[in-house]
Image (spheres, rainbow, N blue to C red):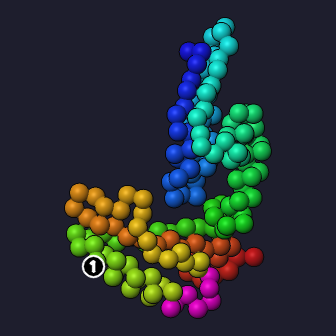
């Protein structure tokens, strides 16, 4: 194969997941590696609406180290893994209003008991795919710094 084309390559970046950039880099790197494996030179065309975003430059330059440094710094600043642990609390129900009401109750319960502010709670919302055939789904995310154990013991 001498030509690989990726249409709408930034679609994966829209996924509300802290790993979206990493997954996009991985997929684009893997796909671009399929081109030009024999004696013929390969070419990769990537179509994006956000060509200035660092992931595309790092893919183009095969710069794994640069990508890693940017990604790990972003995760450090935003307190995402590997610098924290994440738990997603999710409620599914056939009744959307009931699910929304219950997730707010659980969120408020956890928030009230988070007196030492060890948890960073992100407000309740709907996941990307929040409605299945029968169920509505709502969730919230909580993060805790890795130096804390889940049951409150501090690690130096």
Taking the image as shown, residue 71 lies to the left or right of residue 115, namely right
Residue 52: % across, % down: 70, 45
Q: Quadrant of residue 115?
A: bottom right
Taking the image as shown, residue 82 lies to the left or right of residue 126, namely right
Residue 136: % across, % down: 29, 67
Of residue 70 and residue 85, the one placed in the foreground of this image is 70
Residue 6: % across, % down: 54, 31
Q: Residue furthest front?
A: 49
Q: Residue at x 26, y 64 (%)?
A: 135
Give the SS element for disc 1.
helix
Residue named by callout 1:
98
Magenta span: 112-118
Is 30 contained in the magenta span? Answer: no
Question: Where's the C terminus, which quadrant?
Answer: bottom right
Q: Residue at x 66, y 8 (%)?
A: 39
Q: Where is 73 relative to 145, above or below?
A: above
Image mark count: 1
Q: Where is 3 relative to 12, above or below?
A: above
């Amino acid at each position: 194969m001498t030509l690989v084309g990726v249409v709408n390559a930034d679609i994966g970046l829209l996924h509300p997941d802290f790993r979206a950039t990493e997954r996009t880099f991985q997929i684009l790197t893997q796909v671009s590696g399929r081109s030009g494996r024999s004696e013929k030179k390969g070419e990769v065309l990537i179509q994006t609406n956000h060509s200035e975003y660092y992931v595309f430059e790092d893919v183009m330059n095969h710069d794994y180290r640069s990508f890693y440094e940017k990604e790990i710094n972003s995760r450090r600043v935003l307190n995402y893994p590997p610098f924290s642990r994440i738990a997603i609390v999710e409620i599914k129900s056939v009744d959307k209003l009931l699910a929304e009401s219950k997730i707010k109750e659980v969120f408020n319960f956890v928030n009230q008991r988070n007196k030492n502010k060890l948890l960073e709670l992100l407000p309740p919302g709907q996941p990307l795919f929040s409605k299945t055939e029968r169920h509505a789904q709502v969730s919230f995310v909580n993060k805790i710094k890795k130096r804390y154990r889940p049951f409150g013991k501090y690690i130096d």
